[in-house]
Image: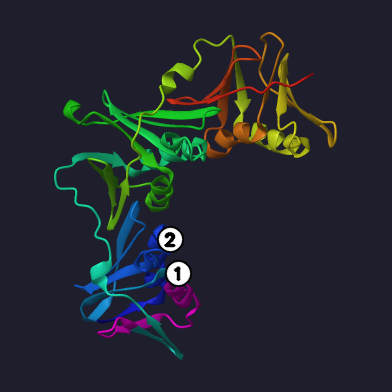
Amino acid sequence: MKFSISKEALLDGLQKVQHVVSTRTTLPILSNVLLVAEDGKLRLTTTDLDVGITGSVEAKVDKPGATTLPAKKLVNIIRELPASEVEITVDAKNVASIQCGPSFFKIIGLGKDDFPPLPDFADAKEYRIPQELLRNGLKKTVYAISTDETRYVLNGIYTSFREGKLTLVATDGRRLAMIENDLDFPASQEIDVIVPTKAVQELLRLLSDSGEVLVKLSGSQVSFSIGDSLLVSKLIEGNYPNYRQVIPGDSSERVELPREAMLETVRRVSLLSSDKSNSVKLVFSDNKVEVTANSPDVGEARETLEVPYDGKALQIAFNPEFLKAPLQNLDEETIYLDLIDEMSPGVVRIEGTFLYVIMPMRVTS
């Protein structure tokens, strides 16, 4: 095969697919990217057998064909090339010659026949979701996914298509993020699935603020078509816990907080929380909240923020990382913190259907 392509287009195409490349050395071909050149396009595909991604870029194809080349090595070479036009020729033994201005590289690939094909979605359930809606929903929940591999059903985002709504939920047992949006789909297509973390991360790289994503669900697989990119992934099998039962009922106090100022305050104060006492305390009184961190071996920090509050005096402590997470990922200027007492979970809300439940921490005063 033989084709020429601009350095920027090739690098862009490779960067969209390179994160999926397998680190398992048992199957060398999984470290490679499948290149298929035909009809004025170069299609690039990578897979680790759990997640697969494919995309295409325009190229001048002199001789159609396909091969697989080591993905990381190829990315590193293309990134360092000097000129803008790259010419790649691959011989019958899958040896690729890369010519670009004064630079010449030869890398050894593997035949395309051993590259695992991506699954087929012939009889799948289909859903069309605005990209912006999905991107926004994932961004507001992804940080709460559990990284504990012993609770594998929590290692992804619970995605529910029910009653004309798309619900996204992530939890690690100590906090929970959830968002709901209206979505049109037939009642016969109601389903709940768990999309694994790696697929969610790749999806966030592909999604933009305009256009639609076509989602297909078939058995234990999901696919997302975005423009000329396709992401496929295995789903996590198992029963997701009943998340609705951890969402507290009516709160006794609601505090309106400026998101950005609160984030900055918690960030500064938490500099003096220690590994041992990893908490910041929020003390609410008339029209102010005092944020403090205190660790005997480090020192203490205190900062006061004026907020509209005329409820009962209340104090509660949270893990600062868990408290900062939604503040960093929301765009709204104002958030609401719903509280019952110092031992019950707090709930961060915004105008809309997002909520974030955070368990309090016990601290000695």
- Label 2 sits on a secondary structure element that is loop
Q: Position of residue 336 (x, y in %)?
A: 56, 22
Q: Residue at x 26, y 68 (%)?
A: 114
Q: Residue at x 46, y 91 (%)?
A: 102
**Of residues 108 and 255, the one drawn nearer to the viewer in this rendering:** 108
Question: Which numbered circle lies on residue 24?
Answer: 2
Q: Amino acid at mark 2?
A: Arg
Q: Residue at x 29, y 71 (%)?
A: 35
- Mark 1 is surrounded, within 10 Å at the Cα level, by few (under 14), some (14 to 19) or many (20 or more) other residues, namely some
Task: Identify residue for label 1.
Answer: 72
The stretch of residues the image draws in magenta is 72-95
- Residue 330 is a magenta residue: no
Left or right of 164, for residue 139: right
Residue 345 is at least partly visible in this image: yes
- Mark 2 is surrounded, within 10 Å at the Cα level, by few (under 14), some (14 to 19) or many (20 or more) other residues, namely few
Q: Which quadrant of the rendered structure holds the N terminus?
A: bottom left
Gap between marks 2 and 1 measured at Cα: 14 Å
Q: Position of residue 101 (x, y in %)?
A: 43, 88
Q: Of marks 2 and 1, which one's residue comes earlier in the chain?
A: 2
Which residue is outermost to the left? 123
Which residue is outermost to the front? 26
Left or right of 119, for residue 156: right
* Dot in front, 2 or 1: 2
Residues under numbered marks 2 and 1 in contact, where contact means CB atoms less than 8 Å apart: no
Quadrant hosting residue 38? bottom left
Q: Amino acid at mark 1?
A: Lys
Residue 71 to residue 292: above or below = below
**Of residues 223 and 100, the one drawn nearer to the viewer in this rendering:** 223
